[in-house]
Amino acid sequence: MLDRSLAAIRGTGHRVVNGVWRLGFASRFFLAVLLHSGISFRRFQLTIKEIYFSGVLSLIIILVSGLFVGMVLGLQGYETLQKYGSESALGTLVALSLVRELGPVLAALLFASRAGSAITAEIGLMKATEQITAMEMMAVDPIARVIAPRFWAGVISMPLLAAMFSAIGVFGGYLVGVVMIGVDEGQFWSQMQSAVDFRLDVMNGVIKSCVFGVAVTAIALFEGYDAPPTAEGVSHATTRTVVTSSLAVLALDFLLTAFMFRGI
Amino acid sequence: MERTTLDLWVGLFVVAGLAAILVLAMKVGNLSTFNMSESYTLQADFDNIGGLKSRSPVKSAGVVVGRVTAITFDNKTFRAQVSMVIDKRYQFPKDTFAKILTAGLLGEQYVGLDPGGDEQVLKGGDQITKTQSAVVLENLISSFLYSKAAEGDAKK
């Protein structure tokens, strides 16, 4: 009995120490990425290649999801608003919910599962097949050559993807609301324009998506870099990337929203 | 280093992303309709501002000419001090009348400016002296009830 409870306490302590250890390593890793990112701008070709892989190839899923999310918002918003006779506010509802919340958050979640998992798997396999060690042997810094370009590519792609998500979502809401249901077009756009502020809504959405880009890519890169060099280790790391970065995005979203729109 | 097709795709991606931000700014947001590059500030004191908020529009003859920037409470006069920025293109006479009005029956509240006939115009930092407070629904109902009750008494 005593033995078992002692073992439980020891296990908990072990896990806590391990977690703190990993957190410290992650912070040092993040700092190293920032310090070694000169090369990803001097040799921008490296970053461009990564923007292609994580940004351009995520376009399809982002655009299709954005269109459908906007269309669903249009339908559901219309159903609720018409009960109060204010269908003309449909444009406001669609635009504000996309620009402030759904655009940045959903784009980041999709980005985490589409590009983040790929980054983790790639880095993890590079480590498992000792490509990273080989680079170190050739006096090539793997952080500067492999990690930093991927990091900056993610940070650059994320706001662009989120903006495209919001823009096409508004178009989807327009398609359903105005073209399909028949809300007045002039009211749809004019109410939207009077309610959406550029600095307060659009720019805050862009800032949010930049923060999400940093969080998702940093988590994906670290999980890949820290993965045990086995098939199982890489698969666990990939799962952890999606789970951790999704949770991080949602938690950060709450914090940022609290700061931006309530002004605590 | 030479150009590759990869560059083209990434270039297109970046252009599309920036275009999306531009669309959000111009078509969805209000950057195109109301650009206050040149503006001046006016002050007005109200007894009661009702539901006026900062960023509420300031309208004259129904046209948006500015925005409310700050609302503070003056502890000496016990009145609300409203600051608003007005587009430099629009000038108002010194005896302009500021009212707090409501758009529609339950809509948002805004400041309405009725120009007077003075030769001199308001400049930055000036105070609008003639103001009319917001109509508070409870006060309206209670005064209506009182007048009804008074009518009933008179008839007896």
Image: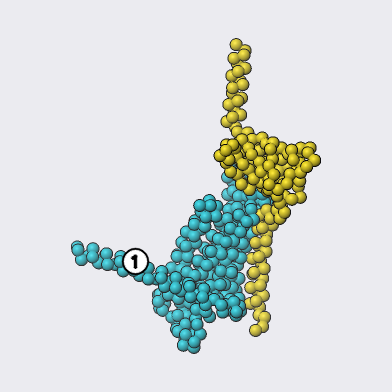
Chain colours: A cyan, B yellow
Rendered-image quadrant of the N terminus of chain B: bottom right
Q: Amino acid at mark 1?
A: Val
Query: Image height check: is B1 above or below A109?
Result: below
Q: Return the residue nearer the eye: B99 or A113.
A: B99
Residue beneath disc 1: A16
Task: State the residue lying farthest toward the front.
Answer: B76
Residue farthest along the top direction in this orientation: B156
Considering every residue shown, the one lying at the far right of the view is B119
**How many residues crowd around disc 1 within 10 Å: few (fewer than 14), some, or many (20 or more)?**
few
Q: Residue at x 37, y 68 (%)?
A: A20
Residue B113 visible somewhere in the drawing:
yes
Q: Position of residue A196 (x, y in %)?
A: 63, 52
For the point 46% across and 74% down, the residue is: A29
Q: Nearer the viewer, residue A180 or A229?
A: A229
Q: Residue at x 74, y 40 (%)?
A: B94
Q: Residue at x 65, y 61 (%)?
A: B21
The part of the image, by quadrant, that contains residue B7 is bottom right
| Chain of the residue that carries numbered disc 1 in the rendered image | A
